[in-house]
Image: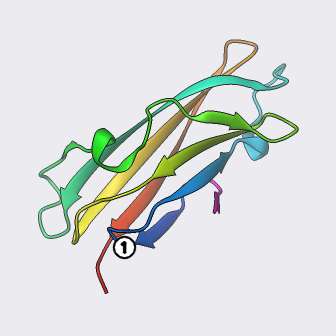
Amino acid sequence: MAIVRKQQFDKQPAEEYPIDISYSPAIPLGSIKIVGGIAFAEKWPRKKPTEITDATSEVLLSETPVVVGPSEMKLRIYIFGGTNDYDYKITVRAFFDNGSKLEEEVWMRVRED
């Protein structure tokens, strides 16, 4: 699944799959490629959005995304798990070869059908 800028998706707790975050639309001036990144997640109960807690180890296989693609302008994270009736914000920060840093956020809603 490829995610582009500030997108929301739904998943069931048992689903596990990779997600690519593309930075191509917002390449920093003077940058050629991504050289690294970091990812982290927060969660909150759908009915109590002010009760935010860390969820990085609950939904991300690793805090270190993988740089992918021939242009090296995507980061890949692997998601799994999650708690039914919770919303998650996953933040993926990219580090570029010229020292620039960009963040992308994706929102994940976990619900069992």
Quadrant where the C terminus is found in the figure? bottom left
Towards the viewer: 38 or 57: 57
Residue 83 is situated, as x and y percent measured from the top left of the image, at 23, 63
SS category of the residue bearing label 1: loop
Q: Main secondary structure of the magenta part?
A: loop
Quadrant where the N terminus is found in the figure? bottom right
Identity, as a three-letter code, of the amino acid under mark 1: Gln
The outermost residue toward the top is 99
Residue 30 against residue 61 in the figure, above or below = above
Left or right of 58 in this view: 32: right
Left or right of 39 in this view: 23: right
Left or right of 72 in this view: 109: left
Residue 13 against residue 112 in the figure, above or below = above
**Residue at horizontal 85 percent and vertical 24 percent from the top:** 32
Towards the viewer: 19 or 100: 19
**Residue at horizontal 30 percent and vertical 76 percent from the top:** 111
Q: Quadrant of residue 63?
A: top left
Near mark 1 (Cα within 10 A), the count class, few <14, some 14-19 or many ≥20, is some
Q: Indicate yes or no whether the magenta region holds residue 91.
A: no
**Residue at horizontal 42 percent and vertical 67 percent from the top:** 15
Towards the viewer: 98 or 36: 36
Residue 74 is situated, as x and y percent measured from the top left of the image, at 71, 41
What span is colored magenta in the figure?
1-5
Display colour scheme: rainbow
**Residue at horizontal 45 percent and vertical 53 percent from the top:** 79
Residue 69 is situated, as x and y percent measured from the top left of the image, at 81, 42
Name the residue carrying label 1.
Answer: 12
Q: Indicate yes or no whether the magenta region holds residue 3.
A: yes
Residue 36 is situated, as x and y percent measured from the top left of the image, at 63, 23
Q: How many marks?
A: 1
Left or right of 79 in this view: 30: right
